[in-house]
């Protein structure tokens, strides 16, 4: 049997509509691409970690530490990958050899031209972004006839482009820029000092952590970072400065793990087509996760575990398995071992547990008690051992949080909390960037929690007109991005109110009510923190980033209902929503690429 006939049979079997040799254009065989799509679906976190580690070997977390052979290795890798793809095409479609030769020559010239631009460029990370997007676009085009893989193709394009954008952000962002409570390595305070202490002493702090800023945090993130530094310096022979910069490789992986988990949550609700792609684009290109990719404190890792707990709670509610409840326990326990505020997810999870417990006991299914016992045995020790240790040894309260001094320049205590949350004066949106007297030279510190939240979600604390070099197009892009975020946030909240009581294909109302309760816990905790700690830094979106994923879920559910509606106004609203999501993702990408070109 000839290979062309074999390919035709495989096409029928797998649903590839390229019709083998009858198609005049080049397409990847469905049988081949299915394997790789299946690998990415089965092991998305491992694949993401593998790519992060490959790039780490060339960049060490920053353009300043670019390896001398990086251009050569990347060029060879692209040529080898192109050769493998073309060999597969010719193997199954020998009649395409002339076209394959032409494509291979053109591809080689493009790669070499890109390598020259890469070598001469001021920002090598930008050319990795451009080259990576070109490769993703090529794969998307080569699989264009595989209609059965449409969801996989579009999702890979969005996730891959999102990864490349985050990688570019890491390349142009040193560990001393746009960080939160990190400080300098070797200091006696902050997250960097905490990591340094673990690295040098190989033990937990044997003193009252209240005397050192940020040392009260549980140690999981800091232990991982210290182990990373030790391996980098003592095993792989990397310089101390490059090893410290390379901690952003971990942050990059955490940021991508968040986006991957968000995708899996969206898929749990059976979202398909544009109802999946639009909210996925919002999450994948959301600026808070771009900022997370370069942040070396413990925020990103805690959100990874929080969203993991959300995902597995949804799955466990659908089918009560030991695997599900063990993973929930591990996610909550390890999340609290990273940052105690991860315990907030335990409230909505406990509500789901209670509903399931009542249902199972009514059916006299006593085995469910064993699952809850297993959950407690795993989760409680993991989550509470460090605060209990500090309580016993040093008298530190279990819910201790370090206080800022009232003489701080960002103190807002002179205003009542009620006046702060009710004041929506127009001057607060005269600039879409967060206002700080000591950083932006503004006339006030940001004080309204909601307005501060909307600004901070897009630009963090450190990005403003001055960091953008007062560039008009960059500032205008930021303005458009801010207002798109306002509209989408309002639309997501409206969708939540509309849909929370409606039944879906996935287990009725409870999964949505679970997300609504978690959203309420996060937002309520945010406002409580803003009242208890009246400082501008307390109104930071990084404390409630899971709300982005929750909002995206409800946007997707709304799109799915509107798309299936009979009235033309529903489809009209759906089209507007998709357009806004696409514009949001494009503006976010343009803004953070532009920020890198300033740097």
Image (cartoon, rainbow, N blue to C red):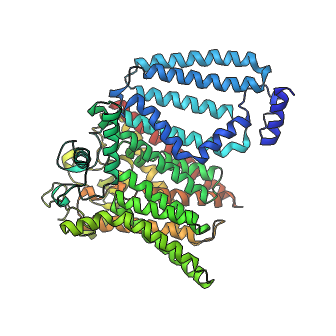
One can see residue 102 in this view: yes
Q: Is residue 189 left or right of residue 450?
A: left
Question: Observer-nearest residue: 102 or 220?
Answer: 220
Q: Is residue 129 left or right of residue 101?
A: left
* Quarter of the rendering occupied by the C terminus: top left
Q: Is residue 421 above or below residue 431?
A: below
Question: Observer-nearest residue: 196 or 292?
Answer: 196
User: Residue pushed farthest left?
Assistant: 407
Please give the name of the residue rendered at 53% of the width and 39% of the height, measured from the top-left corner: 160
Rendered image quadrant of residue 102: top right
Q: Is residue 530 left or right of residue 491?
A: left
One can see residue 314 in this view: no
Rendered image quadrant of residue 17: top right
* Quarter of the rendering occupied by the N terminus: top right
The total of numbered circles placed on residues is 0
Residue 398: % across, % down? 27, 69
Question: Observer-nearest residue: 194 or 21?
Answer: 194
Q: Is residue 576 above or below residue 12?
A: below
Q: Is residue 15 left or right of residue 554?
A: right
Question: Observer-nearest residue: 16 or 579?
Answer: 16
Residue 75: % across, % down? 51, 21
Please give the name of the residue rendered at 41% of the width and 25% of the height, measured from the top-left corner: 124
Residue 121: % across, % down? 40, 21
Residue 85: % across, % down? 66, 26
């Amino acid at each position: 049997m000839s290979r062309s006939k074999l390919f035709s049979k495989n096409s029928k079997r797998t649903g590839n509509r390229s019709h083998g040799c009858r198609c005049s254009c080049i397409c990847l065989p469905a049988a081949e691409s299915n394997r790789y799509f299946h690998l990415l679906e089965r092991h998305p976190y491992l694949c993401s970690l593998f790519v992060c580690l490959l790039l780490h070997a060339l960049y060490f977390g920053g353009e300043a530490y670019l390896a001398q052979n990086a251009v050569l290795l990347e060029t060879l890798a692209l040529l080898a990958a192109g050769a493998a793809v073309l060999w597969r095409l010719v193997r199954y479609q020998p009649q395409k050899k002339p076209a394959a030769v032409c494509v291979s020559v053109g591809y080689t010239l493009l790669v070499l031209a890109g390598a020259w631009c890469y070598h001469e460029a001021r920002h090598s990370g930008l050319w990795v972004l451009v080259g990576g997007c070109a490769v993703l676009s090529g794969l998307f085009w080569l699989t264009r006839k595989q209609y059965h893989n449409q969801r996989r193709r579009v999702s890979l394009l969005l996730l891959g482009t999102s990864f490349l954008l985050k990688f570019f952000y890491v390349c142009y962002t040193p560990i001393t820029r746009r960080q939160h409570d990190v400080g300098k390595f070797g200091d006696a305070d902050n997250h960097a000092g905490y990591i340094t202490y673990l690295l040098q002493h190989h033990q937990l702090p044997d003193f009252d952590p209240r005397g050192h800023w940020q040392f009260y945090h549980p140690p999981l993130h800091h232990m991982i970072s210290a182990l990373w530094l030790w391996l980098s310096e003592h095993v792989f022979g990397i310089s101390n400065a490059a090893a410290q910069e390379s901690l952003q490789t971990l942050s990059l992986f955490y940021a991508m793990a968040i986006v991957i988990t968000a995708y899996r949550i969206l898929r749990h609700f059976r979202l398909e087509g544009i109802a999946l792609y639009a909210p996925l684009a919002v999450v994948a290109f959301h600026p808070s996760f771009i900022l997370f990719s370069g942040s070396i404190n413990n925020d990103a890792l805690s959100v990874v575990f929080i969203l993991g707990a959300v995902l597995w709670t949804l799955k466990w509610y659908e089918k009560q398995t030991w695997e599900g409840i063990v993973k929930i326990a591990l996610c909550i326990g390890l999340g609290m071992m990273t940052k105690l505020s991860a315990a907030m997810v335990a409230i909505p999870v406990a509500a789901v547990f209670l509903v399931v417990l009542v249902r199972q006991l009514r059916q006299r299914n006593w085995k469910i008690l064993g699952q809850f016992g297993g959950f407690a045995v795993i989760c409680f020790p993991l989550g509470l051992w460090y605060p209990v240790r500090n309580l016993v040894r040093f008298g530190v309260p279990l819910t201790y949080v370090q206080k800022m001094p009232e003489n701080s320049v960002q103190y807002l205590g002179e205003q009542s909390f009620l006046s702060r949350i009710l004041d929506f004066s127009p001057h607060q949106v005269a600039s879409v960037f967060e206002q700080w007297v000591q950083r932006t030279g503004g006339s006030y510190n940001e004080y309204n929690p909601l307005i501060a939240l909307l600004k901070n979600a897009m630009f963090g604390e450190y990005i403003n007109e001055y960091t953008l070099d007062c560039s008009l197009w960059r500032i205008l892009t930021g303005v458009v991005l801010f207002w798109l975020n306002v509209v989408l946030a309002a639309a997501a909240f409206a969708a939540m109110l509309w849909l929370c009581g409606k039944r879906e294909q996935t287990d009725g109302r409870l999964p949505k009510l679970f997300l609504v309760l978690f959203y309420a816990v996060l937002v309520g905790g945010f406002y409580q923190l803003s009242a208890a700690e009246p400082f501008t830094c307390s109104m930071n979106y990084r404390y409630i980033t899971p709300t982005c994923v929750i909002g995206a879920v409800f946007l997707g559910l709304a799109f799915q209902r509107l798309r299936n509606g009979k009235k033309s106004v529903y489809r009209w609203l759906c089209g507007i929503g998709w357009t806004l999501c696409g514009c949001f993702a494009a503006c976010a990408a343009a803004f953070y690429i532009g920020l890198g070109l300033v740097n």
